[in-house]
Amino acid sequence: MRLKQIASNADATAALASGLARRWRLGEKFIEGWIYLAGLLTIVVLLGIIVLLIKEGVPIFLDTPPWEFFFGTKWYPVSEPPTFGIMPFFVATLWVTIVATAISVPIGVACAAYLSEVAPDSARETVKPVIELLAGIPSVVMGFIGLMLLSPLVQSAFNLNTGLAGLTAGIMLAFMSLPIIISVSEDALRAVPDGFRQASYALGANKWETIWHVCIPAALSGITAAVMLGVGRAIGETMTVLMVAGGALAVPVSPTDPMMPMTAAIASGIGNAVRGGLQYQALFAIGLILFILTLAVNLIADRVLERQKRKFAR
Amino acid sequence: MIKRINRMEKVWLALGLLIGLFIVLIGCGSNSGSPTTDGEGLSGSIKIIGSNTVTPLSTVWAEEFMKVHPKVSIAVSGPGSGAGIAALLNGTTDICQASRTIKQSEIDNARANGVEPYETQVATDALSVVVNPANPVSELTIAQLSAIYTGKITNWYEVGGSDAEIVVLSRDTNSGTHVFFKEHVVQMLGLASEDKSLEYGSKVLFLPSTEEGVSEVAKNPNAIFYPGLGYVTDEVKPLAIKKTADDPGVLPSVATALDGTYPIARPLLFYTDGTPDGVIKAFIDYCLSPDGQAKVTEVGYVPLNN
Amino acid sequence: MKTRMASRQMSQQIAFGLLVVATAIVVVPVIIIILQIVINGGGAISWDFLTQPPAQAGKAGGIFPAILGTFYLMLGTIIVALPIGVLVGVYLSEYARDNWFTRTVNMAIVNLAGVPSIVYGLFGLGIFVLAFHFGMSLLSASLTLACQALAMTVTTSREAILAVPREYREGSLAVGSTKWQTIRHIVLPQAMPGIITGAVLAMSRAAGETAPILVVGAAFFLPALPQSPFDQFMALPYHLYTVAAHIPGMSKTTIWGVALVLLVVVLAFNVLATIIRLHARKRRYST
């Protein structure tokens, strides 16, 4: 009697347990489904951006052949007939990026070297929060500061007609790229194994010689990645250049010329553009070019960083 | 075990405070939005997008209208007439405020999108050309302005001023003022020397807002710019404009715009999809009423001739 | 021999000096910028300024709708970006096998992080404003900013989850929990501070973004407050951009005041994120 009860109890428990297990497993599968979906969503967003840029931007090449679009120097979207040449914007982006990189790379790497190799802990603890502060300042505030404080300075220092120029924009961009350059370079320098330094000291080199001849070359790929990330930041920045770069449509021949980089060209023109119209298409095409540029720069930086991580992983 | 709970608690506390802050703010927000007295029971929202020139006017009108009808919410943005027309075509605005007339190609485009633009003139503007108060030049002909803005004249001494390079400022392509100035001044529409092939010169600086242009002229002794009358302040000097070299120079003002002596006067317009109705009609009726038109003079523009 | 040693010493001193100068060039302007904003803008800050709507085309009154609009944007951004970010972070650290799908997701995240903000603006315009017919609204703007924040929430969530020691998971599995139970009851709570830090940073970033909302349509003057997600809105960064060119009749102090308020909002969230991060680290290492 009791055996039968026990047996049926056991059966019931087994049935209950396997039922529960099935529900657990189904519940698991349900959650896992959502997780895979979320992963898919990120791919969808990226694809969405690419598809939209291509769909809305490529049709402009039916009106203006690619050669004329890239190398044309006349941008008259509201004339009849409109002409779309983006060389002024491309050269302007080039100029502000060159200025920004020329300023931010030496200063950024030097600062990173200081923080990682030379600075006493007290100095590090003070400087790092300030750099994080800089990283947090919104781009429109940087543009505002450039407009209010820097542009009059540049105007008088270089005796220009107006302080709204590529140089002003480049300087503000340099400050905005500095945090990322410093942070990634510092990581790269820290990743250099201490053994390298010890060996250098053992051979009689002093601290600076070690930094210059051993640490920096060893961290070079990481520093290169940092520079590329800074370049990517400078290329993609919109508000600062919109507010201080000047907005002139001529192809800029010197960094002190007022100019309009590609990001500013899109921002200032998009309000005017009717969906599907020629100007709309042209602006999306510029967006596509921007996207490809920043993509290339960031992918290269990412690859370089991966290689550096693998180089020193032990 | 206990330590972990403490850390978690701290995090939840911080989050709770943050959410609490949001709720308080949103609560404040909703409270100040609720009406105390109901004017005429009108409610709804109106989006006005378009001309930077008209913006000072529409914001004053919007504010006055909302005082009488607290349940109506009116949003004003002024990126440019072109932007407003584009928004009308895209269906993203209720009223397009414009400082230039809509082009035929835009009307065709609108109809293709199922939008029928309906024009209402709400005020008039005397488009002023301003320079820095320290600039000795006080009057220019339209032909001289055209030459300056196409880049043919580059130095102030060529028009009777000091030996200095002219800093030529303009609005960007979003702006109706940009288009109006191009047609009526640069291309000299209506004059014997009219030339539709002329374009802005390559050294011209295109600014995203009228305020920035006026600000730069106030700071820069060699700058020149063309703001709507409502933007002219004591910090800049308007030029007297001569239609041709034989005509007298006329300063921009409400009087000279109304009697037609100022050569570059233009209508300020509202465009809607079809004839306005409902809240939009009530608003536009207010703008055209004597009360509304009184505001036009206050803001500095030219009221309609009644 | 001695003079060569001395000249090497001198080179080192000079070099170190230059390094310090470089660091000063980074640090000093930041301090100047902050001080300028505080000094020039402090005069504008009053209870009215922070709580009243604008009047007289923005020349008088306050900037409350812009502050509220900014908070709404932050909220909207994080409501969308955080859950998705956490789920993807969980996927990448717990479920991902080394197949093409994982590699594509990783690549998508890296790419999304590098897309310029104006391109996100174009995306928002084309998809949310026009194709989905959401119009120029809080909804369109929040969704656009959420897409931009996604890369950050995913990366910080993934790092936070990966940082949870393996032993915790193994212990949980050893007592019979399923994978999801382990994640839900053990891993996620442990990773929570890191995830929250990332969320707060993403909100701070959303508060400061201008380019996307410029394209997707923030309003300049809107004394009434947005009552629904489909309404237009004001926002601090767009307001600063508009008034930065000195609206005639607006006092310079007011303009700096807007910059100050924006800076305070953004930095407050940054500081909050740092506090959470430091606290979590302290607790983790105190056993």
Image: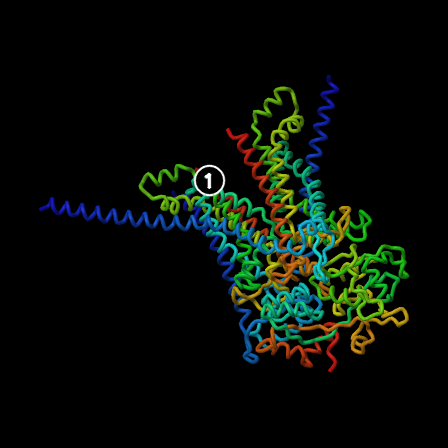
The image shows residue C104 at horizontal and vertical percentages of 49, 44
Residue furthest to the bottom: B306
Please state if A54 lies on the left or on the right of A154 as rendered: left
**Residue at disc 1, secondary structure:** loop
The image shows residue C276 at horizontal and vertical percentages of 51, 47
- Disc 1 target residue: C163
Please state if A89 lies on the left or on the right of C191 as rendered: right
| Total tally of numbered discs in the picture | 1
Can residue A94 be seen here? The reply is: yes
The residue depicted at 49 percent of the width and 61 percent of the height is: B23
Viewer-proximal residue among A17 and B88: B88
Q: Chain of mark 1?
A: C
The residue depicted at 59 percent of the width and 25 percent of the height is: A196
Viewer-proximal residue among B132 and B181: B181
Residue C2, above or below B257: above
Viewer-proximal residue among A265 and C265: A265
Find residue C50 and report its image quarter: bottom right
Amino acid residing under circle 1: Ala
Please state if B15 lies on the left or on the right of B85 as rendered: left
The image shows residue C41 at horizontal and vertical percentages of 67, 57
The residue depicted at 55 percent of the width and 66 percent of the height is: C231
